[in-house]
Image (spheres, rainbow, N blue to C red):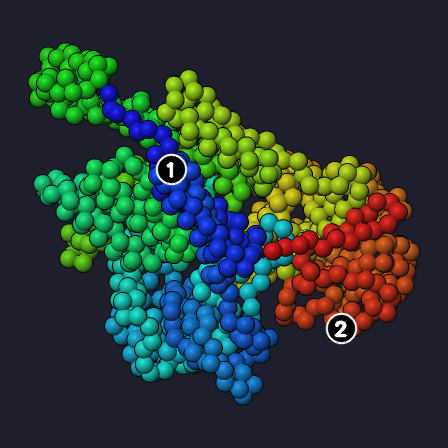
Amino acid sequence: MTRERKPGRQPLLWTALVFSAGLWVGVRAWRPATWWIIAMLAFALAAVWFLRRRPWMAKGLSLGTWFVLGALLIQIRRAPGGDPRIMEITDGNEVTITGHVVREGYGRADGPRSIRRPIDIETESIESAGKIVDIRDGVRLTILEVVHDEGTASGYRLTSAAKADTDSDIAARLKSCPPENLSGDGMRTTAMHCGVSYGTRLRVRAKLHPPRNYRNPGAFDYESYLWDNGIAVLGSAGSQDVEQLPGFVGSRIELWRTRIHAGLVAKIHELWPPQQAALMDAMVLGEDAFLEGGTRTEFQRSGTYHVLVVSGMNLSILAFVIFWTLRQFRLDPALASVVTVVVSFGYAFVTGVGPPVWRAALMLAIYLGARFLYRERSMLNALGAAALGVLIFDPYALFGASFQLTFLSVLIIAAIGVPVLERTTLPYTRGLRLLQFTSYDLHVPPAVAQFRLDLRLIAGRLRKFIGGRFGLIIPGGLARVTLAGCDLLFISALMQAGLALPMAFYFHRATTMGMPANLAVVPLTEVLMPAAVAAVGLGYVSTVVARPAVWVSSWALNLITGTVHWAGGMRLADLRVATPQDRVIVVSLAALAITMLAVRRSRAVVFAALVTLASAAAWVALVPPRPQVRPGILEVTSIDVGQGDSILLVTPEGRTVLVDAGGLPHWMHSSFDVGEQVVSSYLWSRGIERLDAVVITHDHSDHLGGMPRVIANFRPRELWLSTDAPNPELDPILAQARRDGMGINVYREGDQFDYGGAHFHVLAPIREQRTTNKPNEESLVFTVTLAGTTALLEADAERADERRIVEQQPEAQLLKVAHHGSATSTSSDLLATVHPQFAVISVGVRNVYKHPRLEVLQRLQNSGVKTYRTDVMGAVSFYLDGKSVTPYVATVH
């Protein structure tokens, strides 16, 4: 029997865990650096003192040294952020930037006659109001190229460029702009036609603005994401405002990397049709510029998103194929390991994906090094060493989902998966070696020897029918496939259980279809990766020679996408979950730790530990948390959705009603879904997994644009409307509601009803259906009342409707200001009639409509109304208890 490792002999893993704990404490408990240094020296000296006297105490003190080092390191390292001087000129006024390109971007169609091209620039100087300031910081710049009817873009000939950035013509586009011609000192027409490469110096007239998070609990930290990528501010410019300057600034190595990367993308689009090429870009090179939003969603829903991006799995598959191929040519194991590591690091370099693939390459190098030194059983030690190296280099990586998922995935496999397989299927898999030689039976455990004997007996019977040559191959092959399938099934189930907590916490998904989908997708990826790499390599020789590899990879890709489409299309796959509560997090982490510690105990203990881990995962996925609401209180929360509306109502009996769901106007041509990424995230952070009703006040995109994803995520029971007349904006949502069996209610002026312990009174629109192309005139306006406290929600009502509202003499302590503070609403007569104490305006930062208007703010102030704004304060809640209204502004870090 294979000798097992003794548990607990993983010093580097424990060191990495303790160091991580120090980093976590360091960001929450600031102390002067001298305190940490003194503490670290005290721990280190004490560890040396006890080294010979009490070794166990010396080990504990040395771990304490690493803990203090972590706290010190993260506090002396500058937190991500930009040069404060650049923030002073992000007021929306035009500035002139002189800088150089640090990241190229592929343009995408932005409507039928324009192209958006994102690039990252490192500034050298910025001219603002006649003053030039030397600033070095990162700017993510979006360049808009407008294509006119006569085939020109912003005054320059761009007939081919107008087509070049579509998926079908990207290969020809890149071929027409070879990398060696992109860094020269040509005219800016050439730069705009071919794009600009890394290191190109530019002078750009642009408008800058700081990135801003949606200021709601649970919102994605977009600012930190940009800071992690070296971006301090955002900017936009027209192609006519971009001028290429002489010279090159940057690293020649990075320039060659971008050239190679662009050449590989061009080759992929030359070998595969557009839709397949976009997927190959993502899976092989980590280039996601051509992926559609629907494709990402399907992979996420099916639990197979890890194959869509270049991750540790993709690199591991490629490394395994390289190592195995070299060994088939009888190459020395040490040399094969070195070549594999070199190719893996080269692959990580060319993809340019960043830390995730570099971490995988580092772990692979450490593992192969340990294997060469006959320490391959110390996988946890290798993992600890890799994690420690990454965190020392970048302490803030600890707090990113990418690092946590990568580290946890490998830890689960190494600490649980491998030990369990070593005691179950792995001895039998090793027993299939040299099956024809009976002498090898003496070197395997008795049960495995009996297994080998049984296979030879079966082979003896088969020889009578198929001959002696294939008699042993068939049972041996079937045994290998069966054991491999069992291994894959177990590891897939283990990963689903072990990663249930971070998937729920970061992505609010319970990947219920992950296990069956991965059973097909992972083996197919093992075919696709080497075949695709071979196809690209052979494509540089001849496209004809590359065709067999292209066919194999296309076949694997079609099966992968078919599996993903099937699994992602299942109703069960769309199981979304709220943010786990603290007790669930503690229990899940404890279950994972117990399983790791118990995995080398008796079989009964191991089985119990695995059941505990599965139960914790089921709790995360299936048991809804308790929503964070105040019983007996009417809550009105205006969610920060930018320039739009979304209001959460929680009735005294706990019913949840969402009024509108924000959205972006169609002219922005953005794939950003406010319903999924803003509204849903906020609701999940509150522990809400189901809505009782949703309301669409009128059919403007900034009110209903996010509703389809909200309905899909929260499965509301009812839909309230002001009209169900045929409408291209509203019809798809109505069809979705009917498919989901939702009750559809249309309310007009005069309707009153009780719901969840609150009273609703509809004030607009008028009962007669208007024939108008102004949706604001059909806005659903209503009051919601608890005893002596009332909130008036005006949606986008304008003057005519406000006059009718005034005639009904409503009074309310809280007013949701109409139409984002437009001058067409919130009249003095309305304020004099309603007498609100508080008002809230849902409005976007630096919106093009200049909302809220100064005259509206002045009227509110003159009426003595205390006004809150989502663009300034973020999400604002008001609690109505029947006697008074209490405002609350959420604290968002």
Specify the amino acid type for callout 1: Arg
Res 7 label: none
Which percent across, then down, holds residue 678? 59, 52
Amino acid of disc 2 = Leu
Label 2: state its secondary structure.
helix
Residue that carries the numbered disc 2 in the rendered image:
854
Which corner quadrant of the image does residue 738 belong to? Answer: top right
Q: Quadrant of the C terminus?
A: bottom right
Q: Can you say whether 163 is above or below 654 in the image? A: below
In the picture, the quarter occupied by the N terminus is top left
Count of numbered circles on the image: 2
Q: Position of residue 397 (x, y in %)?
A: 44, 53
Q: Is residue 511 visible?
A: yes
- The residue wearing badge 1 is 53
Residue 612 drawn at (x, y percent): 49, 25
Q: Residue at x 47, y 66 (%)?
A: 231
Residue under the point 31% across and 56% down: 351
Residue at point 56%, 68% (across, down) = 210
